[in-house]
Every structure is written in C-alpha cells, then in structure tokens.
Amino acid sequence: MTPGRAALTGQAEDYLKVIYEIERDGEAAATTAIAERLHIAPASVSGMVRRLARQGLVVVERYRGVRLTPKGRRVALQMIRRHRVLESYLVTRLGYGWDGVHDEAERLEHAASPDLIDRMAAALGDPTVDPHGAPIPRADGTVDDARLPVLNDLAVGEQGRVARMSDRDPALLRYLGELGIRPGVTLRLVDRAPFDGPLTVAVGRARHVIGVTVATRVYIRDDRR
Amino acid sequence: MTPGRAALTGQAEDYLKVIYEIERDGEAAATTAIAERLHIAPASVSGMVRRLARQGLVVVERYRGVRLTPKGRRVALQMIRRHRVLESYLVTRLGYGWDGVHDEAERLEHAASPDLIDRMAAALGDPTVDPHGAPIPRADGTVDDARLPVLNDLAVGEQGRVARMSDRDPALLRYLGELGIRPGVTLRLVDRAPFDGPLTVAVGRARHVIGVTVATRVYIRDDRR
DNA sequence: AATACAAGTTAGTACGTACTAACATTATTG
DNA sequence: CAATAATGTTAGTACGTACTAACTTGTATT
C-alpha cells in the first residue's frame, strides 16, 4: 500500500504541505514560492526538492516548478489533517485563542501519531472544520476543499457568510476578531472606494472599513444562489 | 536569567534527559551508559557530549563521564516535566493505556511549548505524579525525586505500597498490570527462593511468583517506619 | 531579436548527528 | 606488575538541511 515507509523528516513534511497549498491555487509550485513560505533561500529549496523527488513524493520540471505525486499528496493531506485537528483540540479543550494556536500546532504536527490525532478528533466529535473554518481532511485522506470566493469578490450590496480565513497571521486574526469577523458570521458589502480602495462592510449592526489586503484573506461561503 | 537561549535540538534534549537519569542514581554519566539508553554507538556520544559542553550544559571529565551543569539540569527537568505531564494527559484525557503512552510522549515532549504543558497540567489539576507513579517536576523546576527501595529490597514478610515503576517497557507494564501491580497497591513479600531466585508476592488475595528482574523495576514507598 | 531582469540551479561550505575502524586510557585480574 | 578486558576517544565518512556566490535559463521589454 504505502511502499516507501522510510519515515519522512519533519522538514520534508513541511515542504509537502506548502507545495500542496501552493499547487492548490493553480500552477505547479515555484521554487521561490516554496522558499518564501518556509522562510528559506531558494537555493535550499532546489536541493530539498531533489530529495523529495528521489523519494517519489514530487515530480520536478526543471526551471518550471514542482508537483505532488499521489503519494506526496497523501502525506501533505495527512499533515494538514494533523494541523487542523490539533488546532481544533487546542482551542476547544485547552483554551488556546484562535490567533495563537498556529505555531503550537505547527510544531506538534510532526510529532503527533495518527492515532493521537484520531483520538483528539474523536474527542471533539470528529469536527469537519477547524477554528478558522478550514476543512479538516478525513483520516482516509479525503477533503472538501473547494475554492471559495473572498470578501473582496463580493459586489456592493451583496452579502455572504464567512467560511474561513487564513490562520497564519495571529495579528490578522486578532484584528478580524475585534471586528467580529469569524467563521459563520454574515457580512454585507456596503461600499467599495474606487481604485482598489477600502471596503465598507456591515457586520451585524456595525460598519467597518477594511483594506483590500484583509478583504482577500476572508473567504465567503458560496451560497448566494 | 537563561543566557544561552540558542534553542536546543531535540537530540540534545534527549541526551540531557538520560544524563539526568543516569546521574541521579550515583555517579557521573558514562559514555556507554548514555549510548545504551539512546541506542546509539558510544563514539556518537563522545561527539555530542562535546557539543553539550560547549553550550555549557554538561561538564566533561575525559574518560570519566559527564555531569550536568545547573543549566543542563534545568533543561533535563523541564523535559521530564513535559514527558510526565504529557503521559498523564494522554492517559486521563485521551484514553491511552499506561503501557502505550511512553513513545507518544517521547516524541511530543520536544515539540510541546511550556505553555501547552502548563495548560495540560492545569486541566488535570496539577497532578504531582504521572500514571506510573513518577513525580512530575513543577514548572519552577523543583521535584521530589527521592531514591526509593525496590520490591526486591523487601525482606520476606515485609509489606509496602507500590510507589512507581519504570515506564519504558510496555510489555513489562502490561505484565505488571495483569498481576494487579500498579502505583498505590499494597504488596507483601511472601517468599524468596534462594540464589536470587524468584519472589512470591501477595497482591491482595492473590499470590504471584515473579523474577528478580521485574522485582527491581517496581519501586516501593518508604513508609514502613 | 537583443537586452535586461526575474527565477532557478549548481558549487562550495557549514553544522548537527550518526556510523565504523583504529587508537588510547583505565580497570581488572592472574 | 604485566597482560587483558572494558571503556572511551579520534579520524574519517555520510546524510539532511541550510547558507552564499556564481552561473544558467526563461520571460518581458524595448
């Protein structure tokens, strides 16, 4: 079934995870893109990517980027599952704030056994999304990971429910939290200033003016049909 | 306060932990002893130990062994705290068996932040011993780690309460569990066969005959005064 | 198409961690 | 005390992972 069981290093796992994330929105993962997300030099990526290819986890097209093999994708999804289950558990069982879990989960995900993750998930009643609204891959490696529109895609007057947001920047999460913007909340786009200007958003009775950068990091459920 | 904050590697943490454990029962930690517990070659220990010395974590006496510095001891105790809190948490909150937690905790202890450990400990009401009866170092680095007599030290006819047992061998723990020997249980040494022969032990109404090896791994509370 | 810039790769280096083989030191014991 | 056994160390190698500097390839612009 899983032929190459030569335990992966934590680093390799991280690479696969970011390659998955980059690949998911479109093209093959570019060296520089990987390097940026991991905060390492592009040259280091070239080397590591070769090792991943040797292990049959990615396919490299020289000078063109890298793609996960099915095997690589399986590992990536497992890491994402671990990450999201951990985040869910830490928030609901150990009092972590949604803006502070990311780093802890990031470290634990390489050490936690699949069994532990399954136990945590079970303890929470097998949640389908994490505290940031991101879908949790199931133990069998399947996910419902639809590409969602972002707040910035709404037309003026349109409304939508917040589906999820990036978990990587605690400051952004704190900011959104202060505005009352979290998964499940309904938003309405009240106004948009010209030339990519700030948006005015209605959150319940409140009105907030937010920048475009923020507005592209909040994903909206696609149920406005 | 802690001057050398250059994050330690997980390996270094493991070394410090086993050095602490070896040193605790007596002499400076010998190279071979360290190598055995970590399942690596003695030559590898020599090298690593030099690095630890460079970081001010141990003091080496060439050809004589190694001792923790106060700084090294602080790290070791923190690792032991992490390990034991994790074990306690996994057993009481996530349904792990006492014979199966060791490895999971062993991996997590390098990834878990002090904050996480403190939260877990708090969630359990700050327990003072782990599921195997081992004392949990406090967050401030203090422990009550008395040297205890083992079952094998009892005289025939004497009795004692089980204080703790080694957590490293799942099979041993399972065996002890089957005999009903766990922390808190009262035992009485009924008989001892000559020439280091097996012991007959009374556990409640039951009688069990156990080998010396096992009898030196079960620690007895020293309250027979 | 020629040039310039961005993106990617290779070469050479470093460090942590492990290994084996060979050598050195300490301890034991005849 | 000398010989041997046990223990410990060094030297040389390997691999993963990162770095910088220099070179190459691909893309965009004039």
Image (cartoon, coloured by chain):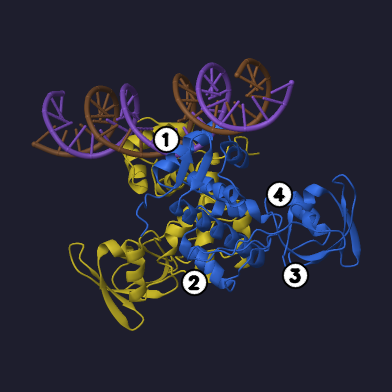
Chain colours: A blue, B yellow, C brown, D purple
- Tell me which numbered mark, 4 or 3, is placed earlier along the sequence: 4
Q: Nearer the viewer, mark 2 or mark 1?
A: 2
Toward the viewer: A21 or B69?
A: A21
Looking at the figure, which quarter contains the C terminus of chain A?
A: bottom right
Mark 3 vs 1: CB contact within 8 A: no
Q: Kindly report the distance in space between the C-alpha atoms of the residues bearing marks 4 and 3.
A: 31 Å
The residues bearing labels 1 and 4 have C-alpha atoms spaced at a distance of: 37 Å
Q: Amino acid at mark 2?
A: Gly
Mark 4 neighbour class, 10 Å CA radius: few under 14, some 14 to 19, many 20 or more: few
- The numbered disc on residue B95 is 2
- The kind of residue on which mark 1 rests is Met
Q: Nearer the viewer, residue A25 or B202?
A: A25
Q: Quadrant of residue A190?
A: bottom right
Which residue, given by chain and number where applicable, does mark 3 sit on? A225
Closer to the camera: disc 3 or disc 1?
3
Rendered image: mark on residue B48: 1
Residue B191 is labelled as none
Label 2 vs label 4: CA separation? 33 Å
Name the residue that disc number 4 marks. Answer: A169
Foreground of the two, A102 or B62: A102
